[in-house]
Amino acid sequence: MMADSPEKLFQLAQSLESGGDFAAAADAYRRGLELAPDTGEAHHNLAGILRRLGLADESLAYARRAAQLLPGRPPVLNSLGQSLEQSDLAEEAEAAFRDALTSEPNYPPAAANLGRLLERRQRPDEAAAVLAPAQAANPGDAALNVNLANAYLGLGRPDEAASLLNAATALDPDLAPALNSLGTAHYIMHDWAAAAAAFTRAIALDPEFAQARENLAQTRFQMGSYAVGWPDYEWRWKNPDNHLTKINFAAPEWDGKPLAGRTLLLHAEQGFGDAIQFVRFAAAIEKQGGRILLACQKELVSLLTGACKLDDVVALDGPVPDHQCHAALLSLPRMLGITGPWPAGSAPYLSAAPHAAITDVGRTNMRIGAAWAGRRRHFMDAYRNRSCQALDFHALAERPGVSLFGLQTDTAGEGPPFAMTDLSPHMTDFAASAALVQAMDIIVTVDTALAHLAGALGKPCAVMLAYTSDWRWNDIYGRIPWYPSVFAFRQPAPGDWSGAFSDLILAFEAGLPIPGGSKLKLP
């Protein structure tokens, strides 16, 4: 064979790939395909290498050509699905994986990939239907075990997931993804120590495992160990499950030192509630002649303007003001050396006048603001589903001396079958929502953004929590440490909203101890 023959180049490419030199292997495949453009296996192999190099568009082109040249082959169709997924073409990827399984039912790589894709697209029931028979046929396949366990987690079956993952790690103790999922199963079941141990083992095997590091941080927060949790929480930026984009500012990240004349640009990074919760830390920054700016969601600009020593507040999607350094809001505790919910007594740190739509003229009833739905996540998971039904507020609505006001922004579907004044048309932004909250006597909410708002305003609030909730709402101190005016009422069992509301009614009848030493009682 000639030195530059396609056969020789393909052999060279395989050798380079085996040695880990993927860029050189890709170049050898490209050169070989220039000489033999219809070599299907070379297209297939090159597509896989290019995926590893992060060259999604080029990988997809070669994967498509491989599927044309080698029709109906499960490995080729599976590879096409992977390249499509890497190019954010999820529906086409799903079709390719299904084509592979049509050619060979229970083909492990395609079943594992399709199940993972479906689970990440919030379709855990479909994922389990694909994965369960494939795992039964291939019980030693690590990817099938882990992905089926993740589907079970999405279906609210953490005990089954843990059993599957324990078996998987018994077969392969060095399986970091299985340990991460095992930690998640323990986390969902409130076994924080076991969760932390599993995440720690996963990180020991793979120190760059971003999901495990962030999961460990959140477990530490659940345990009240904030100081050791903040450094690992920085791995949220590298966790692909978060879809966070770290803004590339020209100025450097803040060094945590007094500003001494510099302008610091703080920026929101996650949801509305996260920005409301963490803006408090701006007040701890030593200005020394400097300025503090905040870029946040446009819906929050009016609310946060002038709060917590902020000199100006702008919308994230607008022009970036001049600054000498920047920091993400949720990185401030680490930068400031905060060891806990600093300080619990700092709330209220936001203010609002009661909304003009609510008048006190002739009022005798207690006003309760209600929201019954949060973000639509984990909706098939009884452990973590954050939404209840408007009907769950029935006992409060029918209580003599109580007036119920709806603060639910997404009011799609049927309204509640009892008297409730819908205030959602007035909730034009968070400043307007704050004014409505301020006009209430207490907020009862499943929507945690509203709970953050009430807590930051110092308004009494009962946050109704799923059995497993976010670390921000841990009540290891007997109260929500971030907000003295907020009370947690957690499901006593997964999916048991009636139990949570019964606990609320009992506590409310006895009197909720609000800041200032008084008690708020139901009429």
Image (cartoon, rainbow, N blue to C red):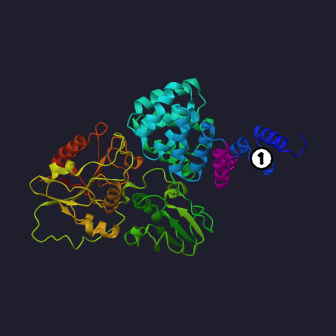
Image coordinates of residue 185 in percent, x first then y, are 44, 35
280 vs 147: above or below: below
> Residue 39, located in which quarter of the rendered image?
top right
Which quadrant, please, contains the N terminus? top right
64 vs 307: above or below: above
**Left/right of residue 338 with respect to residue 204 in the rendered view:** left
Magenta residue span: 47-69
Nearer the observer, 161 or 192: 161
Residue 457 magenta-highlighted: no
Image coordinates of residue 283 in percent, x first then y, are 45, 65
Query: Local crowd at mark 1 within 10 Å, few (<14), some, or many (≥20)?
Result: many
Residue wearing tag 1: 29
Q: Secondary structure at mark 1?
A: helix
Nearer the observer, 86 or 98: 98
Image coordinates of residue 135 in percent, x first then y, are 50, 28
299 vs 2: above or below: below
Q: How many marks?
A: 1
Mark 1: which amino acid? Tyr
> Residue 18, located in which quarter of the rendered image?
top right
Residue 48 magenta-highlighted: yes
**Left/right of residue 375 with respect to residue 23 in the rendered view:** left
- Report whether residue 283 is seen: yes
- Report whether residue 195 is seen: no
